[in-house]
Amino acid sequence: MAEKCIRQLPPVRVPESLEHALMRLAAHEDRPLSEYVRGVLMKHVFGHAPMVELDDDGDKPRRA
């Protein structure tokens, strides 16, 4: 079962060129921008899972 997305991150300021590139990539995959960015973040963070372990609560990273 997929984990519910109930948390919000603080706003992130990006250059206009990055915003447009992300919007184009999201549109290419026919996904909303927020969903696309969430997927990019998940791939980045969990792709580095061997480097970073989560604590027992599963929410605070600690070095492996």
Image (cartoon, rainbow, N blue to C red):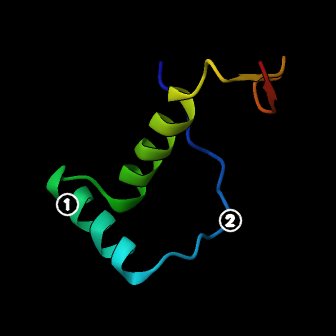
Residue in the picture at 42% in, 53% down:
37
- Would you say 20 lies left or right of 28 here? right
Q: How many marks?
A: 2
- Would you say 24 lies left or right of 5 here? left
Disc 1 target residue: 27
Residue in the picture at 31% in, 58% down:
32
As drawn, the label of residue 52 is none
Residue in the picture at 64% in, 56% down:
8
Find the residue positioned furthest to the bottom.
16
The image shows residue 8, relative to residue 11, as above or below, that is above
Disc 2 target residue: 10
Closest to the observer, 54 or 8: 54
Give the CA separation, mark 2 to mark 1. 23 Å
Closest to the observer, 51 or 41: 51
| Screen quadrant of the C terminus | top right
* Image quadrant where residue 34 sits: bottom left
Q: Amino acid at mark 1?
A: Ala
Res 3 seen here: no
Disc on the earlier residue, 2 or 1: 2
The image shows residue 58, relative to residue 11, as above or below, that is above
Q: Amino acid at mark 2?
A: Pro
- Would you say 14 lies left or right of 34 here? right
